[in-house]
Image (spheres, rainbow, N blue to C red):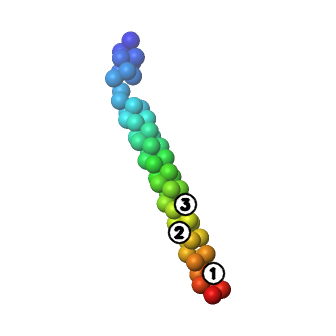
Amino acid sequence: MKSLVSLIRDEDGQSMVEYGIIVAVIAAVCITAFTKVGQAVNKDVGTLANNMTNLGGN
C-alpha cells in the first residue's frame, strides 16, 4: 500500500508529460507560423518576378 501511495504522489512523470505537451504546442505554433510566412514570401517573390519580367519586355 505504501508503494502505491508513493507512486501516486510521485510527480516526476507528470512534469515530463507537461513538458512534452508544451514542446508539442510550441512546435505546432512554429510550424504554422513558418508556413504562413513562407507562403507570404513566396507570393511576394512571385509578384516581384512577374513585375521584373514585365519591365524587361517593355
Instruction: Identify the residue at image location x=56%, y=66%.
Output: 42
Residue type marked 1: Thr
Q: CA distance from mark 1 to mark 2?
A: 14 Å
Q: Quadrant of residue 2?
A: top left
Given residues 12 and 17, the one toward you in this image is: 17
Q: Which residue is mark 1?
A: 53
Q: Secondary structure at mark 1?
A: helix
Q: Relative to 27, is 5 above or below? A: above
Q: Which residue is mark 3?
A: 39
Q: Is residue 19 visible?
A: yes
Q: Position of residue 57 (x, y in %)?
A: 66, 86
* Nearest to viewer (mark 3 / mark 2): 2
Given residues 41 and 48, the one toward you in this image is: 48
Q: Image quadrant for the C terminus?
A: bottom right
Q: Secondary structure at mark 3?
A: helix
Q: Position of residue 54 (x, y in %)?
A: 62, 81
Q: Relative to 3, is 28 above or below? A: below
Q: Quadrant of residue 25?
A: top left
Q: Relative to 11, is 58 above or below? A: below
Q: Earlier in the sequence, mark 3 or mark 2?
A: 3
Q: Which residue is mark 2?
A: 44
Instruction: Identify the residue at image location x=59%, y=81%.
Output: 52
- Left/right placement of residue 14 relative to residue 51 reads left
Residue type marked 3: Gln
Cβ–Cβ under 8 Å for marks 1 and 2: no
Given residues 10 and 16, the one toward you in this image is: 16
